[in-house]
Image (cartoon, rainbow, N blue to C red):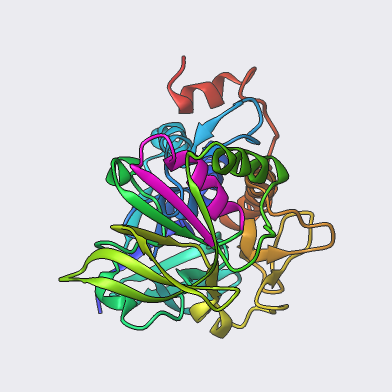
Amino acid sequence: MSDVIKTDVLIIGAGPCGLFAAFELGLLDMKTHFVDILDKVGGQCAELYPEKPIYDIPGIPQVSGQGLTDALMEQIKPFHPTFHLGEMVETVEKIGDPAFRCITDAGKVFECKVLVIAAGGGSFQPKRPPVPGIEAYEGTSVHYAVRKMETFRDKNVLVVGGGDSALDWTLNLHPIAKRITLLHRRDEFRAAPHSVEQMRALVAGGKMDLRLGQVTALSGTEGKLTGATIKGNDNSVTEVVCDTMLPFFGLTMKLGPVANWGIALENNLVPVETSAFETNVPGIFAIGDINTYPGKIKLILCGFHEGALMSQKAHRYVYPEKRLVFQYTTSSSSLQKKLGVN
């Protein structure tokens, strides 16, 4: 077992909500360490849609998932948080009132006064479509996320699915792909109506293809896809030429070890009270998509709000002898000094 790493706050999950929480905690002189199962910061924003535009961040009309991550990393730079990536917290033990010992699957040991769970929906993995032999093409010709759009330039791309992800990437990749084919099992879609209208306009103009049915087989060698067999709703069997396939069947969320930490759960989410988003265990907070409370909305901006209120309560645990005086960054010279803007 490694030497103990001591910190004021351990944040599990380095997505946007966790990153902004480090900013709010830093303003109040609390040191943070992060643990994230992914190999990079940014959570789902960086892992699943780094180049996809986000339109509902206050004051920023449009930003990509990676762009938002980069901005948040720049914002927390004055507080020097430490990141432990590619690791998962497996056990959490209460050792004080409050104080916790947390051990990762890599054997790393943390001791903290406050634990913040900002793990999104927990660990997530894409749902694999039931196509025989698809594993042989995964990572080379079959991709469950778009990390670099340039990867798909001049490709014959088969997009499978009928939700927002399938429609969004159909439209975003259309300008650079050689040909886009969208395949869905029925002629009804769960995506935004405007996206569906745009897709149908492209189909009507002969600029892309729409097929109804499902993939039953893939062809190609050494992980290089050359085509897919499609069984239509009328039981017809046809071939679609493609060298890349993007199946969007949703994500399987797994709460993982969180379920074993003595925290109350509700439908695989963590119930919290709404004054500070604290769990039933004093000193353990949950912010972002992983928590639940009456009126909960799963938006990044809501997670930012939760992180701000959480930090106020966390200060009482980390500095029980100090009186917290609320200050604004626009007018507080001491806060501006911490941010390095004086």
Residue 166 is covered by the magenta coloring: yes
Residue 193 visible in the snapshot: yes
Residue 319 visible in the snapshot: no
Q: Left or right: where does residue 250 sit relative to residue 176?
A: right
Q: Nearer the viewer, residue 243 or 93?
A: 243
- Farthest top residue? 342
Q: Left or right: where does residue 196 sit relative to residue 229?
A: right
Quarter of the rendering occupied by the N terminus: bottom left
Q: Left or right: where does residue 103 sit relative to residue 210?
A: left
The segment highlighted magenta reads 163-183
> Can you give x and y, in whole percent of width and height, for residue 197 in the image?
67, 41
Which residue lies at the image location 59% right of the left edge and 69% below the top edge? Answer: 185
> Can you give x and y, in whole percent of width and height, for residue 33 in the image?
41, 55
Q: Left or right: where does residue 324 sit relative to residue 178?
A: right
Q: Nearer the viewer, residue 114 or 277?
A: 277
Q: Nearer the viewer, residue 268 or 1?
A: 268
Looking at the rendered structure, the number of numbered marks drawn on it comes to: 0
> Can you give x and y, in whole percent of width and height, for residue 338 in the image?
47, 28
Residue 182 is covered by the magenta coloring: yes
- Farthest left residue? 222
Quadrant of res 324: top right
Asked if 114 appears above or below 78 in the picture, the reply is below
> Can you give x and y, in whole percent of width and height, for residue 276 in the image?
73, 55
Which residue lies at the image location 52% right of the left edge and 32% below the top edge? Answer: 63
Quadrant of res 102: bottom left
Which residue lies at the image location 65% right of the left edge and 46% below the top edge? Answer: 196
Asked if 167 appears above or below 98 in the picture, the reply is above
Which residue lies at the image location 46% right of the left edge and 17% below the top edge? Answer: 341
